[in-house]
Image (spheres, grey):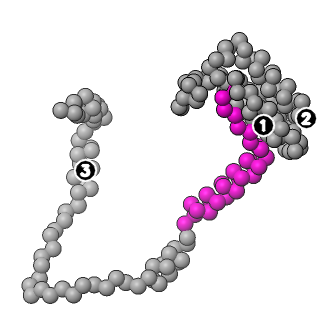
Amino acid sequence: MPRYELCYILAAGVSDDQVPEVATQIQKFITDFGGTDIQEELLGKKKLAYPIKKTRNGFYVTETFTMPANKINDLEAKVRSQTATVIRHLIINVDEHLIRSEKDKVAQSKLTKQAPEGEQDQSQASRPAPAAAPVARSEAVPTPKVEPVKDEVKEIAKELSTEELDKQIEAALSDDIIK
């Protein structure tokens, strides 16, 4: 039998005392439809990202169980009918989810691998070079001399101690940016 996970959010109208009663009611639905190996996890009350049915907070509960695949639609219909207590629910097949995530990991590892250097050289060599525009100049244009900046940055970094750097950062952060 496949393994499923049911996550649902209880409305704010359900008091903290009623949460275990509603959770046992949902567990009873699961056992009525042939669910076994039920594991319940009460995740607690959390603020919702956006209001659902004029509710800002909800109590999250997760049930993990095994059930015949042909009974899962009946369970979802039963949970969906609990509109007074359950404001959102989601049932996933954990086995399929694990298989899909493994495939995703393999695909991601293939994407992160870079092509060998020989293949990169060939792909660049096969591209046509861009055509250069003809330049008609009678005199040579001097190129400006660029001095390396890295040495100056290293010298400045060596001159600043960590305390001085912290002071400068604090001063920069304390300045009023919006004027």
User: Is residue 108 on the magenta stretch?
Assistant: yes
Q: Amino acid at mark 2?
A: Gly
Kindly identify which residue carries mark 3. 153
Q: Of all residues shown, which one is farthest toward the left?
A: 139
Q: Toward the viewer: 115 or 151?
A: 115
Say if residue 147 shows up in the picture.
yes
Q: Residue at x 22, y 34 (%)?
A: 177
Q: Label 1 crowding class (10 Å Cα cut-off): few <14, some 14-19, many 20+?
A: some
Residue 146 vertical placement versus 175 (above, below)? below
Residue drawn at (62%, 24%) of the image:
58
Q: What distance separates the C-alpha of mark 3 from that of mark 1?
A: 64 Å
Res 179 label:
none
Q: Is residue 130 left or right of 83 when viewed as pictured?
A: left
Give the SS element for disc 3.
helix
Circle 3 crowding by C-alpha within 10 Å: few under 14, some 14–19, many from 20: few
In the picture of the structure, the residue carrying the numbered disc 1 is 76
Label 2 or label 1, whichever comes before in sequence order = 2
Q: Which residue is mark 2?
A: 34
The residue segment tinted magenta is: 86-114
Q: Nearer the viewer, residue 2 or 170?
A: 2
> Dividing the image into 4 quarters, which one contains the N terminus?
top right
User: Which numbered disc, 2 or 3, marks the residue that appears first in the sequence?
Assistant: 2
